[in-house]
Image (cartoon, helix red, strand yellow):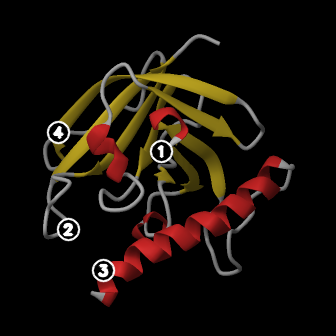
């Protein structure tokens, strides 16, 4: 039971520390580590579900990064740029909300320089990571949120992924 409470508590504490790092980043500091030994830093803020979800997105997609929050995959473009911005997160913590999103809903990404980009969800898909891949070189500004699937799986590490695809709205 303690292990079950530890993971959500760690995720919550990490978001609190990352919110503080976000404030410093938004004030102009670069690569602000949320804690002294962190090898990641805030790159964006994701707001979803009409503001009920407000997450700091970290640089990188390693397992260590994703343990603390959603991570921006470095092979993808930064928020607002032409191409696909890919953000990954764990299905049982930060990206649990994805099971309830629907096409048409809005997502907002804010960069550390204060720019806000609004995206509209156009699709949700279940893909097999062994045979499918995300298209990174898109002709429009696209956002892909990726998490493991199914949401209620008892064991982690299966090959299925839940992918939310959104396109950037004109400014």
**3 vs 2, front mark:** 3
Q: Which is more toward the observer, 106 or 51?
A: 51
Mark 4 touches mark 1? (CB < 8 Å): no
**1 vs 3, front mark:** 3
Q: Determine whether 43 is above or below 9 in the image.
A: above
Q: CA distance from mark 3 to mark 2?
A: 14 Å
Which comes before the other along the chain, label 4 or label 1?
1
Q: Residues within 10 Å of mark 4 (few under 14, many from 20)?
A: some
Q: Label 1: state its secondary structure.
A: loop
What residue does disc 1 label? 75
Which comes before the other along the chain, label 2 or label 4?
4
Residue drawn at x 14%, y 62% is 153
What residue does disc 2 label? 156
Which comes before the other along the chain, label 3 or label 2?
3
Pinpoint residue 166: horizontal percent, then vertical percent.
40, 25
Q: Residues within 10 Å of mark 1 (few under 14, many from 20)?
A: few
What residue does disc 4 label? 126
Which comes before the other along the chain, label 2 or label 1?
1
Residue at the extreme top of the image, as rendered: 170
**4 vs 1, front mark:** 4
Q: Quadrant of the N terminus?
A: bottom left
Which comes before the other along the chain, label 1 or label 3?
3
What residue does disc 3 label? 4
Q: Label 4: state its secondary structure.
A: strand
């Amino acid at each position: 039971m303690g292990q079950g409470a530890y993971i959500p508590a760690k995720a919550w504490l990490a978001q609190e520390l990352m919110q503080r790092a976000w404030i410093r980043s938004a004030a102009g500091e670069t690569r602000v580590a949320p804690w002294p030994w962190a090898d990641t830093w805030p790159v964006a803020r994701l707001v979803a579900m009409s503001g009920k979800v407000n997450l700091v997105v970290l640089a990188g997609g390693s397992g260590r990064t994703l343990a603390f929050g959603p991570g921006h995959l470095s092979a993808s473009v930064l928020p607002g740029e032409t191409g696909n911005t890919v953000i990954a997160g764990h299905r049982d913590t930060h990206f649990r909300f994805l099971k309830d999103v629907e096409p048409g809903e809005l997502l907002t990404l804010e960069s550390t320089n204060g720019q806000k980009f609004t995206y509209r969800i156009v699709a949700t898909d279940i893909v097999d990571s062994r045979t499918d891949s995300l298209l990174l070189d898109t002709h429009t500004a696209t956002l892909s949120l990726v998490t493991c699937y199914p949401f209620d799986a008892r064991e982690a590490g299966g090959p299925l992924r839940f992918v939310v695809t959104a396109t950037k709205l004109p400014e």
